[in-house]
Image (cartoon, rainbow, N blue to C red):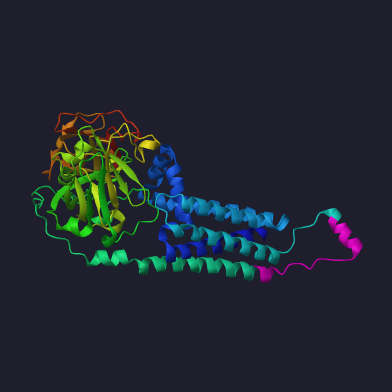
């Protein structure tokens, strides 16, 4: 019963802390601050493993893992409290204190961020002390039982039914508090309401329509333009920042002759441009789906930086998110003609909150970890030999150009013998694709037919007819870039600057 007391105390403590955070500061939820600290402290191999196992559900998996560890520690605290009071309650109090320290050391911490963890610590300590008393004293040793018998005194046995009522009530209160926290966040997000009411201005420079023939429209083949709801999300934010457009500011400073500051209204008043750009996560393994293509609306960073006038010796821009994340982008990539944007729109609507609303970076040809800063609030012009970004400090390459890749989307598993099609996508942003070849088993490489590319900054679909014969077959693909490069056969891991290798699928034909 003592372990159950600890678990119930932890549940009510966590729920109370989460509800307090929802009311005061959503980012200060004890789970969020501890999870954020673990993400920051995790070595690259741990991040890669989490994404490989859970994909875009990596954050959910982390929160579940934290919860399971918390329950195990709480059960131990319950046992300790019954045998050595008050040390069990002290364990839960210490967890609350750790939460307070971590919360106040987060990069985006506000003055009230200590409160939710403090509430969790106080309530957890008090709840465990109360529930442990209801569980009764620890079992006595043989000498102790003999002493009781000699004295003729006996400790009343604990009322198990009453104890279960108390622990059940505490657990239910914790669960209700957590549900209440989610309801407060869902109903109290003024930012989402503001976003829904925004009507973005028409682009001064509109993107050309998607060319006829760009979409092959084959079942199972990724669409050439990725819907917002299907666009991959990989970032370090356990709690998505709520940034009100009226409060948003962008500061351009550092090695510049003229500091620039922009408000939301000033940004929208500038001549915005549209472009289709494919974004890719550096954690996208060969054949992975951490990639998507969208129509972006924004202001070209080359124009903004031209106003700031970087000094001649600057070579990097350190972009910073409202939550403290930073990315190191080569200055050249933000000032050349590739179409890097301060994006405000995605596929004809304001950026989704999860994808950086109100403003994010979009830079063709670079992996997201060095370019695609969401909720961006600062562009600091500097040098690579002077400053380092979030992932650079964790062993990743500082520059991160996207590597040439291709992927087989269909067929995926078992198919019927006969005429069918092999199809997929290929990408080499800011260079383009000139060819894709397919090999079946140990046969010759055969050219696939490319769809019409939207631009060199987007992926392109491809297809090849295949007469499938019964049996087990291995299909491979490789691409050639417009710069003459070919997709290498050798497999390399995603760290430190992106995976390489030929993608292959094994299918059973019947």
- Left or right of residue 79, residue 420 in this image: left
Q: Residue at x 44, y 58 (%)?
A: 111
On the image, the x and y values in percent for residue 131 come to: 65, 65
Q: Residue furthest front?
A: 257
Q: Residue at x 24, y 41 (%)?
A: 408
Q: Is residue 159 magenta?
A: yes
Residue 314 x/y as whole percent: 24, 34
Q: Is residue 323 visible?
A: yes
Taking depth in this image into account, of 405 and 15 the one nearest to the observer is 15
**Quarter where residue 256 is shown:** top left
Tell me the residue at 70%/65% (across/down).
Answer: 133
Q: Quadrant of the C terminus?
A: top left
**Side (left or right) of 390 relative to 313:** right
- The quarter in which the N terminus is drawn is bottom right
Residue farthest toward the right in the current orientation of the protein: 150
Q: Report the magenta residues as a range.
A: 144-163
> Residue 277: x and y, percent?
18, 46
Which percent across, then down, holds residue 124? 59, 61
Q: Nearer the viewer, residue 436 or 481?
A: 481
Q: Which residue is depicted at the point 33% across and 52% down?
A: 322
Please tell me whether residue 146 belongs to the stretch shown in magenta. yes
């Amino acid at each position: 019963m003592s372990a159950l007391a600890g678990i119930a105390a932890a549940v009510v403590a966590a729920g109370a802390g989460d509800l307090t955070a929802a009311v005061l500061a959503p980012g200060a939820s004890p789970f969020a601050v501890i999870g954020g600290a673990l993400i920051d402290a995790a070595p690259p191999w741990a991040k890669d493993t989490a994404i490989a196992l859970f994909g875009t559900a990596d954050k959910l998996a982390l929160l579940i893992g934290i919860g399971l560890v918390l329950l195990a520690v709480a059960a131990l605290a319950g046992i300790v409290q019954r045998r050595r009071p008050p040390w069990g309650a002290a364990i839960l109090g210490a967890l609350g204190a750790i939460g307070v320290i971590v919360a106040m050391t987060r990069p985006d911490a506000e003055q009230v961020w200590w409160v939710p963890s403090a509430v969790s610590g106080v309530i957890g300590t008090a709840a465990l002390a109360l529930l442990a008393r209801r569980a009764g004293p620890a079992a006595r040793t043989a000498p102790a039982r003999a002493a009781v018998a000699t004295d003729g005194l006996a400790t009343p046995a604990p009322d198990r039914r009453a104890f279960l009522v108390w622990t059940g009530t505490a657990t239910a209160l914790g669960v209700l508090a957590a549900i209440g926290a989610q309801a407060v966040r869902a109903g109290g997000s003024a930012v989402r309401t503001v976003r829904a009411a925004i009507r973005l201005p028409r682009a001064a420079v509109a993107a050309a329509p998607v060319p006829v023939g760009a979409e092959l429209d084959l079942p199972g083949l990724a669409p050439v333009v990725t819907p917002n709801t299907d666009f991959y999300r990989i970032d370090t934010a356990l709690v998505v920042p709520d940034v009100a457009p009226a409060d948003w500011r962008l500061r351009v400073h550092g090695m510049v002759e003229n500091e620039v500051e922009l408000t939301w209204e000033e940004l929208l008043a500038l001549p915005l441009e549209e472009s289709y750009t494919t974004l890719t996560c550096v954690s996208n393994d060969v054949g992975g789906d951490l990639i998507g293509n969208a129509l972006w609306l924004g202001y070209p960073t080359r124009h903004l930086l031209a106003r700031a006038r970087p000094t001649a010796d600057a070579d990097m821009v350190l972009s910073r998110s409202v939550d403290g994340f930073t990315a190191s982008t080569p200055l050249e990539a933000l000032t050349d003609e590739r179409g890097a944007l301060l994006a405000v729109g995605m596929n004809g609507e304001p950026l989704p909150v999860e994808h950086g609303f109100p403003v994010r970076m979009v830079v063709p040809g670079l992996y997201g970890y060095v370019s695609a800063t969401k909720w961006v609030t600062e562009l600091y012009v500097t040098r690579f030999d002077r400053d380092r970004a979030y992932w650079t400090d964790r062993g990743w390459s500082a520059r991160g150009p996207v590597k040439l890749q291709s992927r087989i989307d269909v067929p995926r598993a078992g198919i019927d013998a006969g005429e069918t099609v092999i199809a997929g996508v290929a990408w080499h942003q800011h260079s383009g694709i000139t060819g894709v070849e397919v090999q079946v088993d140990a046969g010759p490489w055969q050219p696939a037919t490319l769809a019409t590319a939207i631009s060199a900054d987007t992926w392109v679909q491809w297809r090849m007819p295949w007469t499938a014969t019964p049996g087990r077959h291995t299909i491979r693909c490789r691409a050639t870039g417009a710069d003459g490069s070919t997709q290498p056969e050798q497999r390399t891991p995603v760290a430190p600057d992106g995976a390489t290798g030929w993608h292959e699928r094994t299918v059973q034909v019947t």
